Image (cartoon, helix red, strand yellow):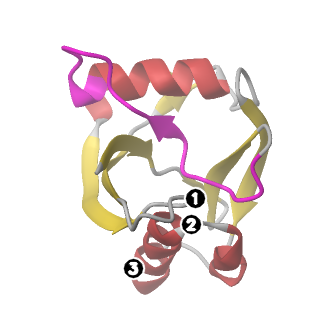
Amino acid sequence: MIDSLAWVHVRDRRLLCVRSEGKRKFYLPGGKREPGESDVAGLCREIREELGVELDPLSFSLFGVLEEQADGFADGRLVHMTAYTASHRGTPRPRGEVAELGWLSSAEAGHCPPAGRRVLRMLTEAGRID
């Protein structure tokens, strides 16, 4: 099981996703906690490193906890993703391992692994994205 944190950020009815160097699919921004980190501290650090923006720790709201097939693992491994919404300061820009940002609609779900497709489906059902 891969335990991860993700930021769900919608702008202009599109979901922010990132593509890492050497990868073909777009993922939700975020990553893994370091030992002893809370969800808030870990996600704030990951988003700062990946996108150069500061999440507001007081604005965090649980979006959902998902378990889906992990991308790129032939052994059937799952990803356990705890996803949050949060307000931020700054403009997201690719940094570190992130090669590209994408603002995806539900029609582009095929560019995402299973967890990303599920978040897009949830946002579509809630009327938040096209």
Q: What residue type is labelled 2?
A: Pro
Residue at coordinates 62% horizontally, 79% vertically from top-left? 106
Type of the residue with mark 3: Ala
Foreground: 33 or 95? 33
Marks 3 and 2, how far apart at CA = 20 Å
Measuring 42% from the left and 85% from the top, which residue is drawn there? 125
Left or right? Give the position of 123 relative to 10. Answer: left
34 lies above or below 62? above
Of the residues tagged 3 and 2, which is closer to the observer? 2
Q: Position of residue 108 (x, y in %)?
A: 72, 76
- Residue 108 on the magenta span: no
Question: Badge 1: how crowded within 10 Å, few (<14), some, or many (20+)?
Answer: few
What residue range appears in magenta?
Answer: 23-40
Alpha carbon separation for disc pair 1 and 3: 29 Å
Residue in the picture at 65% in, 27% down? 51
Q: Is mark 3 on a helix, strand or loop?
A: loop
Q: Name the residue under label 3.
A: 126
Can residue 56 be seen at all in this image of the molecule? no
Q: Which of 67 and 120 is in front in this view?
A: 67
Q: Which amino acid does label 1 sit on?
A: Gly
Q: Mark 2 points at which residue?
A: 113
